[in-house]
Image (spheres, rainbow, N blue to C red):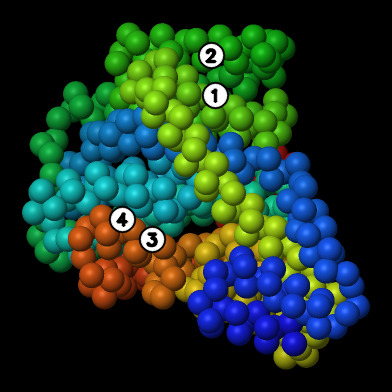
Amino acid sequence: MLKALFLLLMVSGIPVAIAMAGSSLLYILVSGDLPAFAVVHRMIGGIDSFPLLAVPFFILAGNLMNNAGITNRIYNFALALVGWLKGGLGHVNVLGSVIFAGMSGTAIADAAGLGTIEIKAMKDHGYQTEFAVGVTAASATLGPIIPPSLPFVIYAMMANVSVGALFLAGILPGVLMAILMMLTVAWFAHKNGWGGDIKFEWARLSKALIETLVVCVWPVALYYLVQWGAPAQATVIAGIVLIFLGDRYFKWQAVLPIMTPVLLIGGMSTGIFTPTEGAIAACVWAMVLGLAWYRTLSWRMFVKVCLDTVETTATVMFIVAAASIFGWMLTATGVTAAIASGVLAITREPWLFLLMANLLMLFVGCFLEPTAAITILVPILLPIARQLGVDPVHFGLVMVLNLMIGLLHPPMGMVLFVLARVAKLTVERTTVAILPWLVPLLVALFVLTYVPSISLWLPRSVGL
């Protein structure tokens, strides 16, 4: 009955969060087993979680970076690094998304923020609008895979796993996805005879390579200094001061913005701060860059960003609260146990369960927003995965990737609609433009599903 009520409300066009809470309330009223106040109690309990404090701060950090002119710096840095390759701006699109993913944490922010710049630049350089939209949509899926990631935080809360472990688990898969996308760009460039979009210049490339080297060497140097006995806090502060001095003297393009994920992962891995504290640190870092250092963020814009963050946070939290009562009702009425028994009656092979789960999650991702989908699917699928020996961190990565691919599909794909509006294309043409880019994404999904060591190597290497 609970499932029937939920589907009935969904079909009638009611938003998914209201459908989840409403179906639970109707079921309680009809059955009479519990007081109606139980709905409110469980919804409040669902969001009374310390890890969820990271949600508004990660949203705020992404909004600050998106509104402080950081996207232009990332684009110019990626252009200097790979713009001279054949199909240059396609490679720039992918690399820019890799970098921006370490700040925004969501696919929609990537598509709306960096995508606006990239699609316009590619159209100005003579690329077909469909190609520009396709590569932008595919690369936007990197947003929630490369840390920080809002869907990872929601999954970690629902599955009771480490946020830091999930963040680390997304790094190598994100790199793999980026490589597959750049190979796809290279194939299109070879097929269409495209050249580079900027002239190859050693001076410009060497400067970008030096910035990349700084980003890679800086955290490693700080780590070993601390290991050799240097005081941790003083060493980190001194390192940050040196980075700012280097930016002032050498006029780096994107070292400071790229340091956002480095600081987050480094701080969580070394135990300097928790993921929630890391989200606050990311906000402080974004405010320092936007308000004080680059001075591209005015106080009026800062207030607007805060209001947008409040609106987005309220939406996410309401979905989580509604899903918590719905998930609790699914468990209490025996739905999750029945589904688990049905699946285990079909197979006890992990590979076949993962195949079935992937198909289900791809389907659900086409209809539900990722936060809602995670909160519904975790109570149903994760217990089965645990029984079959599937690592919950690995399963979380696979789930999020499936749902990100779902964002590119009608009827509910938010990235699809955002890019259709940005590129001024119909939804039908945008859908067709995205279809070829499902190939590298599905290849990545297959590899990451059946080679769990790719996602688990980094978390296990640091003991998470």
Residue 213: give x, y in percent of width and height.
40, 27
> What amino acid is at disc 1?
Val
C-beta proximity under 8 Å, tags 2 and 3: no
Q: Calculate the distance from the C-alpha at mark 2 to the C-alpha at mark 4.
A: 35 Å
Which is more N-terminal, label 4 or label 2? 4
Which is more N-terminal, label 1 or label 3? 1
* Residue placed furthest toward the bottom: 346
> What amino acid is at disc 4?
Thr
The residue to which callout 3 is attached is 415
Front-lying residue, 220 or 429: 429
The residue to which callout 4 is attached is 136
Please rate how many residues cluster around mark 4, counting C-alpha atoms within 10 Å: few if below 14, some from 14 to 19, many from 20: many
Residue 6 placement: quadrant? bottom right
Residue 236 placement: quadrant? top right
Q: Calculate the distance from the C-alpha at mark 3 to the C-alpha at mark 4.
A: 10 Å
Residue located at (37% from left, 71% from top): 439
Between marks 2 and 3 in the image, the one whose residue lies nearer the viewer = 3
For label 1, the SS is helix
> What amino acid is at disc 2?
Gly
Residue 417: give x, y in percent of width and height.
34, 64
Q: Calculate the distance from the C-alpha at mark 3 to the C-alpha at mark 1.
A: 28 Å
Please rate how many residues cluster around mark 1, counting C-alpha atoms within 10 Å: few if below 14, some from 14 to 19, many from 20: some
Q: Is residue 142 left or right of residue 395?
A: left
